[in-house]
Image (spheres, coloured by chain):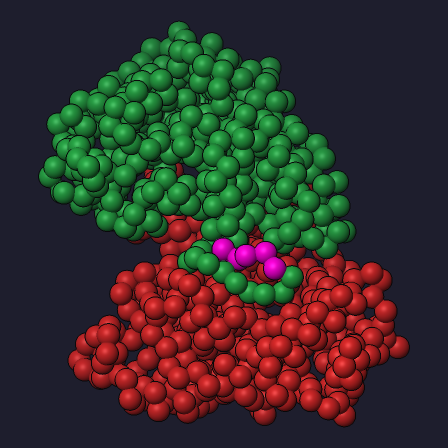
Chain colours: A red, B green
Amino acid sequence: MDKIEQNFLHALQTVLGQPNPFVPLHEPEFMGNEWERVKDCLDSTFVSSIGKYVDHFEVMLAEYTGAKYAVALVNGTAALHIALLLAGVKPGDEVLIPALSFVATANAVSHCGAIPHFIDSEFETLGIDPFALNDYLNDFSLSSSEGLTNRFTGRRIAAVVPMHTYGHPVDMTSLLDVANRYHLPVVEDAAESLGSRYQGQHTGTFGRLGTLSFNGNKVITTGGGGAILTNDAELAQQAKHLTTTAKHPHRWEFFHDAVAWNYRLPNLNAALGCAQLEQLPDFLHRKRLLAQQYQEIYREMEGIDFVVEPANSQSNYWLNTLELRQPSFEMRDRLLTAANDAGYQCRPTWKLLHKLPMYADCPHAPLPVAEQLEASLINVPSSAKLAGAGI
Amino acid sequence: MDKIEQNFLHALQTVLGQPNPFVPLHEPEFMGNEWERVKDCLDSTFVSSIGKYVDHFEVMLAEYTGAKYAVALVNGTAALHIALLLAGVKPGDEVLIPALSFVATANAVSHCGAIPHFIDSEFETLGIDPFALNDYLNDFSLSSSEGLTNRFTGRRIAAVVPMHTYGHPVDMTSLLDVANRYHLPVVEDAAESLGSRYQGQHTGTFGRLGTLSFNGNKVITTGGGGAILTNDAELAQQAKHLTTTAKHPHRWEFFHDAVAWNYRLPNLNAALGCAQLEQLPDFLHRKRLLAQQYQEIYREMEGIDFVVEPANSQSNYWLNTLELRQPSFEMRDRLLTAANDAGYQCRPTWKLLHKLPMYADCPHAPLPVAEQLEASLINVPSSAKLAGAGI
């Protein structure tokens, strides 16, 4: 084992303590009112599509994020699918998304019948680079009365989807500038960034619509769940309508007016979500402490940097992230092997989306930064309860 | 109030007792191990995509239904969507479904990019009429090396979807005969018929794939949930793969090989499902008693029949159903008004799917029986706990 591996492992051990026998990457914590809320929901028998917890969870989400409306859904992929539809994405359109993202971002585009078009990231935020995007749009797009089109494929460019990687906010001021310049609707994939703010404003509330995820590995969980955020009353109403079979309210009649989905969050999962959201400030506080511990110990380390939140931003530090100064798949995998063998669950970032077989033929920008990040990022254990574990 | 309304109400009152203040159409019952299982799931922290309850629920479903494999999913619509894809339904294909069904059956076809083609039902089963289907296929379809096509639209006919209405099994022997004759894959929509058997065999296990729903209004509930049943190991494996982001198992690598969905059932909901499934025989027993009570009281009634299970079948009597001898929307709505005003939640059957605006341009067979059923069916309160309520 080389010095870098030894130092890397030693730092993990200092922050996290001895694995006993295994430290997961991220695990949920149910130390609040989870039992009480879930039991109350079972006792009410309203565990499914109707019930007070869905309404309550939506109000809590809107209050917490500052969005005017929140619509609770079955997961983050479903939320992004419907948000894209509501932003006007049509079959055959292209949607600009980062090449460096979880596969769900691209899948949601595909579920609209649209084609993902992959964009580069920047080192500071790990998200879409607005300046590179601007230059690229200048080169490959054409503006007409029909809207923006890709001059090479002839397809309409329907939206841009900034994704706040591991909780670190995208440079939204610059991104919104570019989007406005090209009249592109912005749909924010804030699946990873509940609790993250850019210039004090919650991620997911800058775009026409934003989406959240409450999967089991996220900052808070509903088992499976997600939400759409928007400030537009009409879009919120449509989001609810399209995700609840587009049924018109009537005492008994079954009148549905659109092809629609069964994407609502069950009340049982919303009950868990309410209890989890009550604890979010505490989770964020402890996750921040953990991030500081990582930051401190990796500050002096040769060859490895800790990724800190971007300027003007407050990150939820969903997944703490290390970055090799010299991108190297070989070194990355050696560190991953050492850590996982020792019982610390660590992961690389995602395989870039344009390298996956089903997206290999999709258009993409030059991706020099994403390519470097792919070979240099490592996520380390990040559960709130790990704060102070090594002391 | 006319005599028929008075008799109808009196019969409801005799079977159900006085509403106090309201008798829902169908409500779940959590008198078994629901809290124990859900609490155990919360305590494990495995509430999301991984956990023992999903596996356990799938094994229990396979054992109960006799299917070789069951794949637990987020709801019945998602299950039918993926089952249709796996049966080979492609964008632009037509899929034969009953005009008399809940809108989800048609939506799942649309989610494949395919077009629903509506078929008539028969009085005895309330489901697809295999003989009418045979005659209709003889008229409108063409067989070629490409498969079966609609001679008028030129589109491929990709599958037929029998739906077991309110739990009453379709005449599967005749339906399978027709499907075999025309080389049509059968995908059974058994969303309403968990516990229903045709010639002793569980519904949902006759077709290449079958689907179940565990929505809050169903015989058992997981909050929201569904499943795919199949006897084909390869299809079961593909169903699991496509509904869990098509990720290849690896210690840390994110390699996904297909456009895929996040449709897995959370472990929390599966925990509830396990407890519910344990009680299914008891629910079915009491629902059967309730159906007998309805059958008895409506036996002598002028103008109204109780819909009994078809020959060679055992129905779960999910929703008990009355049928006006003289189809009449006006009379139907008068009875619905009287019952709902009195606190008994009653509903008509669904508006026929070809009458909904988004499906109005889809092809359909002559629908004389479905048209009559639409104007004559009324569902009455059917929860298991109502058995003996009026005594």
Which residue is found at the position 82% from the left and 61% from the top? A21
Q: Indicate the position of residue B373 as horizontal and vertical percent values.
A: 28, 25
Region in magenta? B245-250
Q: Indicate the position of residue A99 as horizontal and vertical percent values.
A: 45, 75
Image position of A301 (left or right of B354): right
Can residue A336 be seen here? The reply is: yes
Please, is residue B204 above or below residue A348 in the view?
A: above
Q: Nearer the viewer, residue B151 or A331?
A: A331
Q: Indicate the position of residue B316 as horizontal and vertical percent values.
A: 50, 22
Q: Indicate the position of residue A100 as horizontal and vertical percent values.
A: 49, 75
Please, is residue B349 above or below residue A156 in the view?
A: above
* Residue B247 inside the magenta-drawn segment: yes
Which residue is found at the position 45% from the left and 14% from the top? B199
* Residue B145 inside the magenta-drawn segment: no
Q: Nearer the viewer, residue A61 or B389?
A: A61
Can residue B375 be seen here? The reply is: no
Image position of B341 (left or right of A254): right
Q: Nearer the viewer, residue A35 or B329?
A: A35
Given the current orientation, which residue lies at the most extreme front position?
Answer: A1
Image position of A337 (left or right of B340): right
Q: Quadrant of the N terminus of chain B?
A: top left
Please, is residue B194 above or below residue B355 in the view?
A: above
Given the current orientation, which residue lies at the most extreme top position?
Answer: B300
Image position of A267 (left or right of B134): right
Quarter location, residue B252 = bottom right
